[in-house]
Amino acid sequence: QVQLVESGGGLVQAGGSLRLSCAASGRTFSSYVMGWFRQAPGKERDFVATISSSGRRTYYADAVKGRFTISRDNAKNMVVLQMNSLKPEDTAVYYCAAQYSSNWPVVRGEDYDYWGQGTQVTVSS
């Protein structure tokens, strides 16, 4: 089992940056594909980015491609989402998720097995 705890959210002006972190428990973190999702008020949860268990492969939603970067450190059981050039439409609760699968890329939330509690990101215009 994997427990996930996000941190790093906050309030930032448009054009600014934030760095979200997700700390994972468990010895098998390096076996899991990790993903970030977000949910704005009144909207469905959306896929943001995913990274393979080794960290060699990444995949992004079109809305964040070129602005966001996902990375992981398996020695520290950590996955990071670096968010640059933030826009008001990036405002949402951001969730870290883990899934144990050989499929790639995995962009559906229902395919993920474990979720964090979420961290709020607010981008002001």
Image (cartoon, grey):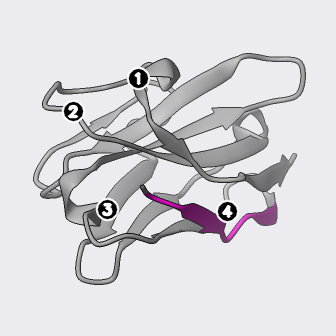
**Amino acid beneath label 2:** Ser
- Decide if residue 14 is on the left or right side of residue 38: right
Quickly name the residue at label 2: 101
Q: Secondary structure at mark 4?
A: loop
**Amino acid beneath label 3:** Ser
The mark nearer the N terminus, 3 or 1, is 3
Mark 1 Cα-neighbour bin, 10 Å: few <14, some 14–19, many ≥20: few
Stretch of the chain drawn in magenta: 2-11
Look at the image and say whether residue 10 sits in the magenta stretch. yes
Mark 2 Cα-neighbour bin, 10 Å: few <14, some 14–19, many ≥20: some
Residue at the outermost bottom position: 76
- Decide if residue 90 is on the left or right side of residue 52: right
The mark nearer the N terminus, 2 or 4, is 4
Give me the C-alpha separation between circle 4 and circle 1: 32 Å
Looking at the image, residue 112 lies above or below residue 121: above
Mark 4 Cα-neighbour bin, 10 Å: few <14, some 14–19, many ≥20: some
Give me the C-alpha separation between circle 2 and circle 1: 9 Å
Tell me the mark number nearer the camera, choosing from 2 and 4. Answer: 2
- Decide if residue 74 is on the left or right side of residue 24: left
Quickly name the residue at label 1: 111
User: Where does residue 10 sit, x and y in percent of width and height?
Assistant: 80, 65
The mark nearer the N terminus, 2 or 1, is 2
- Whether residue 18 is visible: no
